[in-house]
Image (tube, rainbow, N blue to C red):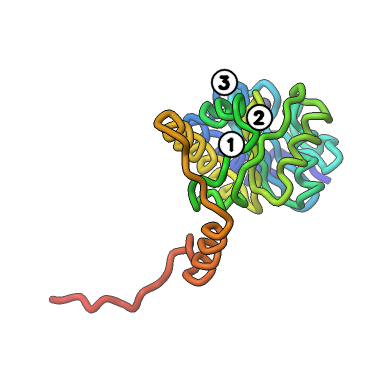
Amino acid sequence: MTDSSSAWSAERAAVADACRRLGAEGLLIGTAGNVSVRTEDRVAITATGAVLADLTPDQVTVVDLDGKIVSGRLRPTSELDLHLGVYHRYGTGAVVHTHAPMATALSLVLDELPCIHYQLLTLGGTVRVAPYATFGTPELAESVLTALEGRGGALMANHGAVTHAPTLDKAVEHALLLEWACGVYQSAAALGQPRVLDEQQQLAVIEAAVARNYGTTQSVPPVQEGP
Ligand SMILES: [Zn+2]
């Protein structure tokens, strides 16, 4: 085991980059929120008390899957157990938790965000709202883990949102998608009762996406360019 600052420099830089991106997109407020990425049995995670939108790599602490510090001089986020729980239960690669404004607003009034747009199928469809529990507690971690069953994201009642994915980039994209969908739902709900995609419509989207390799760039034959 090594504790040189270069040992986890790529992971630390990736977490800092992800935080700055989430901050630039307006999903982070002050020290609220936390981000982590897993490499085998090590997790690089934001330190408690750090201003995430300005996060620097030295504000990322590396722990093992039991939460023991492997590298770093700062105490990890108070939601460490939530992150570790997601890794243990779902074997994922990265976790993002924010108090993003649209997601948090919906978490005050809804029990679930219905599947109002086909892009939400990226997260598994309907997004559950995990019942409220005090931050940093095992009760909150358990509540969120249950809400994440079969999903890439969940809302946390009167608190915020959490997303996870095999890679950190994807977990960030999921956080942005969830926040966008929450904003769309709010705008629509102000005008009337939002329509929801039914099961048949959702299934048809999944079939079409598989058939067309949706979401990936696709090569076309070279264009014959004129003189
Ligand atoms: Zn929080």
First reached walking from the N terminus: tag 2 or tag 3: 3
Query: At which x and y percent is residue 55?
Result: 58, 29
> Ligand 1 is found in which quarter of the picture?
top right
What residue is drawn where x is 83% and y is 36%? 67
- The residue that mark 3 highlights is 30
Mark 2: amino acid: Gln
- The residue that mark 2 highlights is 59
Mark 3: amino acid: Gly
Question: What is the spatial separation of the Cα atoms under label 3 and label 1, in whole angstroms?
Answer: 14 Å
Q: Quadrant of the C terminus?
A: bottom left
Location of residue 213 with respect to 175 vertically, above or below = below
First reached walking from the N terminus: tag 2 or tag 1: 1
- The residue that mark 1 highlights is 16
Are the two marked residues, 2 and 3, in contact with CB atoms closer than 8 angstroms?
A: no
Mark 1: amino acid: Ala
Circle 1 sits in a helix, a strand or a loop, which is it? helix
Query: At which x and y percent is residue 48?
Result: 70, 24
